[in-house]
Every structure is written in structure tokens, then in C-alpha cells.
């Protein structure tokens, strides 16, 4: 085995909680100095010293549960690119996974240091191996190679060669390009666009129809090829879209083609953009409707156990579209670093992070004013903000957002002046998500150059708004009023300028108690 067994791990041995709070700052490409958010939740910052192996396309996975299968190990890497080799060390509860490129391995590790990977409910540790490639003895690693061959065939668009699928029952030929998806424990809204982002990682999504049946959100999703449906089902079935909720239950549909009549928020045919939007209802013909009733009985009964932990679904979603993702047990507190300490204030952080959740408290660290702790209303909102804002530019600096180990942000003791660095926003009237089921949940988008403006007074003109946003330090490239003139789209020259405009002008008083509402839009003008 070419000495691989001796590669028992690179760097400091640490549990998954410590991995989460420290190693993101030492990940390749982060360019960040090693800091933590301190142990006192306040002023002091301590240095972590973690020895990292240089990036390699071979990843070393430790603390695997005894019953973990090769397919489950491969599934950790699938969303990030082609998996080219695997070696499992059963007695040591370890494995080595070789990715097709070093870039894919870097993307995978960067993701998993932010969101702890799980296999069979157990957190596992992933690090770079000191090996640059795997040289496996095929005689002693036959089962793993058979599984890899089968998965590679699915990835490459072919079917496994004869006998190669015998090791894993999940890799039988795909019966249909159409998947039936049921969302369990849907505490947060799941939209058609979210499904498209997650599932498009595994192939071209042609059509989606969403509907509610037996009080459950369901969807039919059609790929261009059955092997893509096979791969998505293998990686995503039983996984959570959000932290400990919105669990995907996936089965093959008996249908082989979907007939979509309207393109709207309930149904979409990506091959026919000219379809009308209809009246907001999904375009489902009677034959499809009849198939729903035949095609929706046994999926939940086939899935044993409770919620699965976040793993490949999280990775797929993050890689596909920066969808918010979480893992059980995380706090609602974020550590934000590399801030522009000359410019940043608690209200500016409240406004920006408030796009993705209800910010409760903000603390800029006293002895490290380029870092701040932000307490969101819950862990899901923290994950949402982290996935959308990490790596964005705020006041000309690329900010880093990670989960903090703290559960809350402490307020200063009575009578203690902390120079306005800590602010409590618990009772702010500006929270966007106070009302359960608010439409704001449906309109959460990544930072973009186009802003959505609402609550515009009748007497305000396009020129007024162009001047207002130009004064925030940017260039307005395009503008479009909605029909009623109470809402508009405004496009800035860059995402950074749009972020600045939102921070400066969300809740801006336009006169007569009209406070402008600003959010990011998925549209372009």
C-alpha cells in the first residue's frame, strides 16, 4: 500500500468542535492570520498554531464509524468534482480519498472546515494527506475499487460495467430521469430556485414542478439523463437542506417526462423560457396529476431513522449556489474578521447581516477592532449569513465569516463604557423575519449588483433615486420602476457598491415617514 497506512493525520489532533472554530483561518487560500474569537467573549484574541500539510488532491479522513461504507466516503467528495481513487483502512476507521484535481480537494476542504462533515451521524475529520496520489493494491482493495468504478460511471454519464455494481445496491441502473422529492420537517421555506441550485450540481435540470400533497411540500424534477438522477439520489437522499430540518426524501418517479405549462414560482421548464407565467399555479395536466396520486405512497416508509446529519447535501448546495447550510449543534453567533476598522460600526453590521436574519447583538472586539461577534436569532440564520457573506467586500476589504464557539454575545457590565463597540438590537423594529411565514423568507438572495427597492413615496422620481445611490459612493448603471412606482430595481456598477448602497440607504427616511427598504435582487435590468 506504498506506506500509506503510516499517514495517520497531518497537523494537530483535534475534535470536530475545535476544528470548526480554528482551522478555517488556516485553510489554504484564506490568506488570514490565525485568530480566534477569544475565550472571554470580549476583548482578547488568542493565536492558534495549527500545522497544515500543503494542499494535495489526496484527503485523509479520520474518525469514520465502523459501519461506514465506501459509497458514503465517496459521497463526501462527489459534489466537489470527480473522485479518482479511494483507500479505506477499516481497522483504523480511516480512509483516503483522491480527487481528480487539487482545486477540487481545496474546495472540498475549505467547505468542510466551515461545516463539520458527518458520516452516519458521526462527525469525521478531513485533512490534506502528505501523499500527492494514491497507489492502491487492487487485489487488497477490490471492493472499494468496484464501488469507485460504479460511481465514476454514473458521474461520467455511462453505466457501471458488468459486476461492478454488486457491491452496492444503490448503484442499480436509473429507471427514470425524473425524481420525486418530498421535503420533511420544512421549518424554513424551500423554493423552486433552491431545489434547482442544489440539484443542478449533478447534471442539467430541465423541468421542475412543485406542489403540496397531504400537507407536505413535494416536487418532481427532471434531468436530461437518468444517470444524473441516479447520482443526485445517491448523494442527496436523506440529507438536510438547512440545519436539522428540510430533509430531502428522494425516489425515482414512475414518470419519464414532465409536461410544464407555465414558468412561475411553482413550475419551471428551463428548456422553454417563452412559456407564460399563468395565474401563479403550476401547469400540471390531468395525466401528471393522476400520476402524483400513484407515485407518492411509500417513500417515507422506506427511510428508517430520524433526521440524517448534513453531509453531501450541504456540500452540493454550497458548491452549487451558496445555499444556507448548517450542522446540528452550531450556535447562532458568527465571528467576522478582516473588517475595515476605520469604517465599520455595529449598525452597519446589523444592516448587512440583517438581510439574512434578525441580528440580536453586535460586538466589535475591543483589542482587535477588525473582528466582530454577531449574534443571529438562531443557528439557521447564522448559517445563511455565513454562506452568503463570507468572502464579500465591505468597505473595500474582503470579510471572513465563520461560526463562533460562543453561544451568545455578552453585553458590557452596567456602567462600563466600551466606546459603543457593543450594541443590543434585540428589540429593533428593523428585523425582517419577525413574522413566521413572512414573504421576506422567499426573497433571500446572495449579494448582487442589483438592488430591490420598496416603500418608495409617490413623488420620488428615478433621478431622485439615482442621485441618492450615487452619493453612497457608486455608479448607478441601470434603473427600472415596477408598474405601481412603489418598487424599483437599481443596478450598481459592482456587488461591492451595491453592498455599500444597502448599508447606507436601507431604512433611509424619504420624507413623510416613508422609510426606503433595500434588499438584494436575483434579477438584472
Image (cartoon, rainbow, N blue to C red):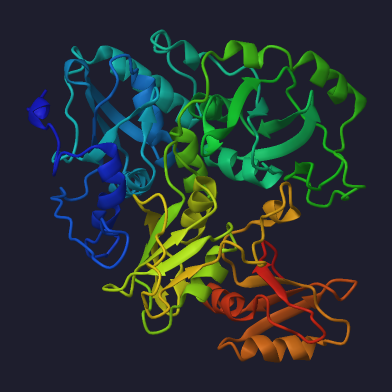
Q: Is residue 277 above or below residue 368?
A: above
Task: Tell me if 334 is positioned left or right of 196 in this view.
Answer: left
Residue 235 is situated, as x and y percent measured from the top left of the image, at: 48, 28
Does residue 493 show up? Answer: no
Q: Nearer the viewer, residue 253 or 247?
A: 247
Residue 75 is situated, as x and y percent measured from the top left of the image, at: 41, 29
Name the residue located 18 percent from the left edge and 13 percent from the top edge. 140
Residue 215 is situated, as x and y percent measured from the top left of the image, at: 78, 27
Residue 484 is situated, as x and y percent measured from the top left of the image, at: 90, 72
Does residue 429 show up? Answer: yes
Quarter of the rendering occupied by the N terminus: top left
Corner quadrant of residue 228: top right
Name the residue located 28 percent from the left edge and 47 percent from the top edge. 102
Task: Tell me if 511 is positioned left or right of 227 in this view.
Answer: right
Q: Nearer the viewer, residue 66 or 233?
A: 66
Q: Is residue 389 above or below residue 143?
A: below
What is the tally of numbered marks visible in this picture?
Answer: 0
Quarter of the rendering occupied by the C terminus: bottom right
Name the residue located 30 percent from the left edge and 59 percent from the top edge. 37
Amino acid at each position: 500500500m506504498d506506506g500509506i497506512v503510516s499517514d495517520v493525520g497531518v497537523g494537530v489532533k483535534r475534535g470536530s468542535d475545535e476544528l470548526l472554530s480554528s482551522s478555517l483561518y488556516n485553510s489554504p487560500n484564506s490568506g488570514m492570520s490565525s485568530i480566534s474569537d477569544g475565550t472571554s467573549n470580549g476583548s482578547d484574541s488568542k493565536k492558534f498554531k495549527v500545522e497544515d500539510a500543503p494542499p494535495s488532491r489526496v484527503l485523509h479522513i479520520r474518525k469514520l464509524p465502523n459501519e461506514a461504507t465506501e459509497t458514503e466516503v465517496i459521497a463526501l467528495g462527489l459534489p466537489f468534482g470527480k473522485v479518482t481513487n479511494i483507500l479505506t483502512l477499516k481497522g483504523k476507521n480511516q480512509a483516503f480519498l483522491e480527487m481528480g484535481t487539487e482545486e477540487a480537494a481545496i474546495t472540498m476542504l475549505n467547505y468542510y472546515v466551515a461545516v463539520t462533515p458527518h458520516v452516519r451521524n458521526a462527525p469525521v475529520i478531513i485533512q490534506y494527506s502528505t501523499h500527492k496520489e494514491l497507489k492502491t493494491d487492487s487485489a487488497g482493495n477490490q471492493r472499494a475499487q468496484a464501488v469507485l468504478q460504479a460511481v465514476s460511471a454514473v458521474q461520467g454519464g455511462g453505466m457501471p460495467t458488468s459486476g461492478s455494481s454488486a457491491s452496492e445496491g444503490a448503484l442499480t441502473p436509473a429507471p427514470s430521469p425524473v425524481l420525486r422529492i418530498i421535503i420533511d420537517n420544512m421549518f424554513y421555506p424551500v423554493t423552486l430556485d433552491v431545489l434547482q441550485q442544489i440539484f443542478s450540481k449533478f447534471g442539467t435540470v430541465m423541468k421542475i414542478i412543485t406542489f403540496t400533497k397531504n400537507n407536505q411540500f413535494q416536487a418532481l424534477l427532471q434531468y436530461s439523463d437518468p444517470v444524473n438522477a441516479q447520482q443526485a439520489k445517491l448523494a442527496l437522499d436523506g440529507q438536510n437542506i438547512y440545519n436539522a430540518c428540510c430533509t430531502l426524501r428522494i425516489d425515482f418517479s414512475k414518470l419519464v417526462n414532465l409536461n410544464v405549462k407555465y414558468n412561475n414560482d411553482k413550475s419551471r421548464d428551463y428548456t422553454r423560457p417563452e412559456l407564460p407565467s399563468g395565474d401563479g399555479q403550476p401547469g400540471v395536466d390531468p395525466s401528471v396529476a393522476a400520476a402524483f396520486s400513484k407515485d407518492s405512497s411509500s417513500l417515507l416508509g422506506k427511510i428508517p431513522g430520524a433526521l440524517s446529519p448534513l453531509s453531501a447535501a450541504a456540500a452540493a448546495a454550497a458548491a452549487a449556489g451558496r445555499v444556507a447550510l448548517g450542522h446540528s449543534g452550531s450556535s447562532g453567533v458568527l465571528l467576522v474578521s478582516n473588517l475595515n476598522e476605520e469604517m465599520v460600526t455595529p449598525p452597519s453590521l446589523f444592516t448587512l447581516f440583517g438581510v439574512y436574519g434578525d441580528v440580536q447583538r453586535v460586538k466589535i472586539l475591543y483589542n482587535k477592532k477588525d473582528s466582530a461577534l454577531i449574534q443571529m436569532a438562531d443557528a439557521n440564520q447564522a448559517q445563511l449569513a455565513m454562506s452568503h457573506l463570507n468572502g464579500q467586500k465591505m468597505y473595500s476589504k474582503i470579510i471572513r465569516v465563520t461560526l463562533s464557539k460562543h453561544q451568545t454575545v455578552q453585553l458590557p457590565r452596567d456602567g462600563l463604557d466600551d466606546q459603543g463597540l457593543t450594541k443590543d438590537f434585540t428589540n429593533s423594529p428593523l428585523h425582517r423575519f419577525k413574522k413566521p411565514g413572512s414573504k421576506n423568507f422567499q426573497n433571500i438572495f446572495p449579494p448582487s449588483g442589483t438592488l430591490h427597492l420598496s416603500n418608495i413615496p409617490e413623488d420620488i422620481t428615478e433621478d431622485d433615486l439615482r442621485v441618492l445611490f450615487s452619493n453612497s459612493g457608486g455608479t448607478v448603471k441601470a434603473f427600472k420602476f415596477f408598474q405601481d412606482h412603489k418598487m424599483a430595481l437599481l443596478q450598481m456598477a459592482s456587488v461591492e457598491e451595491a453592498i455599500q448602497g444597502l448599508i447606507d440607504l436601507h431604512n433611509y427616511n424619504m420624507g413623510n415617514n416613508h422609510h426606503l427598504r433595500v434588499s438584494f435582487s436575483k434579477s438584472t435590468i
